[in-house]
Amino acid sequence: MPLLEVKDLEVAFSIDKKDITCIDKVSFSVSEGEILCIVGESGSGKSVTSLSILRLLGKNGKITGGSIYFNGESLVDKSEKEMDLIRGSQITMIFQDALSSLNPVFTIGSQLTESIVTHMGLNKKEARVRAEELLRTVGLPSPNAILKKYPHTLSGGMRQRVMIAMALSCNPRLVIADEPTTALDVTIQAQIMDLLKRLNQELGMSIILITHDMGVVAEMADRVLVMYAGQIVEEALVETIFKEPEHPYTKALLQSIPSIKDYEERELIPIQGAVPEEYHEMDGCRFSNRCKYALSLCSKSQDMFMVKEDHYKRCWRTDLSDTSY
């Protein structure tokens, strides 16, 4: 049984008293100790999908269909009080911007020990010892001094490490990392990703990593979901995604990024256009208006189907081997 199982998830936001569906029948699972990467352009629905798992959609957002099971229990049916016991203890989230996620008027120590006291039942002294251990685990020197500091006095990389420490504070089984290296320089990005990979291997925790960086996907993922306009358009093991992409959008993503193995003549090909905003009104393939290889069939709705074992796609085209973007 997978640790997390999402089936036919539908999410809508209320805009001008009208429900607008932004996540359309999304299904996936995460196994114990697995790193699942969700990739796609901004506006594809990656963050909304992750917020749905934790039921953090805000007042105008709601789950309108499907199911979310964590460790065999339905999260959709749980009350807010029951979800509070799960958030921060069994499932935690690392957000994009650590500075806006940390409270500026409280020290790092008070924010880090709060969840430890709440979820682990330790007293304040024991929680502080635990907090120092966590800061050492994420590679921060002088943890006792850092616990006394305020968020704005730390660098971006240090704040992100603090956020990771908070996410790990109660030994969660699943960590959702939503673009955890946004606005950090490339050296710090590499350090943060190496840290997440090491913690995954040492602690056996599962990770959902949301990103638009295919280089990060190649380095981190066991399995990959490619999202576009509120739908999953391809799912496969990471090696398969890079060697045998089956959806035109996946192939276009790969052909738009540079590689250290590039030959001199290779031309990077950008994807023309942008993710549509009113995609909930589209019946057929939502990528068809940007796809150079669209067929007449693309105006019809397409479900996910199996290409081969552990490889699925949502596309009418059966063969991309003779096409180049």
Image (cartoon, rainbow, N blue to C red):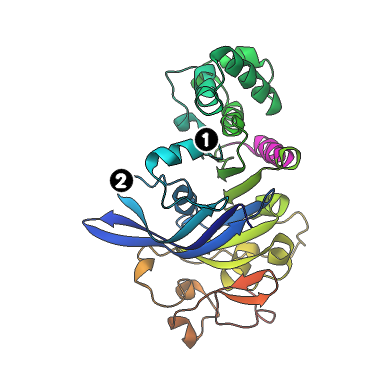
- Quarter assignment of residue 279: bottom left
Task: Specify few, some or many for label 2: CA neighbours under 10 Å numbering under 14, 14-19, or 20 or more.
Answer: few
Q: In the rendering, at what x and y percent does residue 269 appear?
A: 60, 65
Taking the spot 75% from the left edge, 38% from the top edge, the residue there is 202
Relative to 297, does residue 277 appear above or below in the rendering? above
Relative to 214, does residue 193 appear above or below in the rendering? above
Q: In the rendering, at what x and y percent does residue 238 appear?
A: 70, 60
- Total marks drawn? 2
Give, as a single range, the part of the protein colored magenta: 184-199
Decide if residue 156 is on the left or right side of residue 258.
left
Residue flagged by tag 1: what amino acid is it?
Answer: Gly
Q: In the rendering, at what x and y percent does residue 239 appear?
A: 74, 62
* Disc 1 element: loop
Instruction: Give the main secondary structure, helix, strand or loop, of the magenta stretch.
Output: helix
Tell which of 200 and 249 is nearer to you: 200
Residue 248 visible in the snapshot:
yes
Task: Specify few, some or many for label 1: CA neighbours under 10 Å numbering under 14, 14-19, or 20 or more.
Answer: many
Taking the spot 38% from the left edge, 73% from the top edge, the residue there is 282
- Quarter assignment of residue 201: top right
Which residue is labeled 2 in the image? Answer: 59
* Disc 2 element: loop
Which residue is labeled 1 in the image? Answer: 88
| In magenta stretch: residue 188 | yes
Q: Tell me the quarter of the image containing the C terminus.
A: bottom right
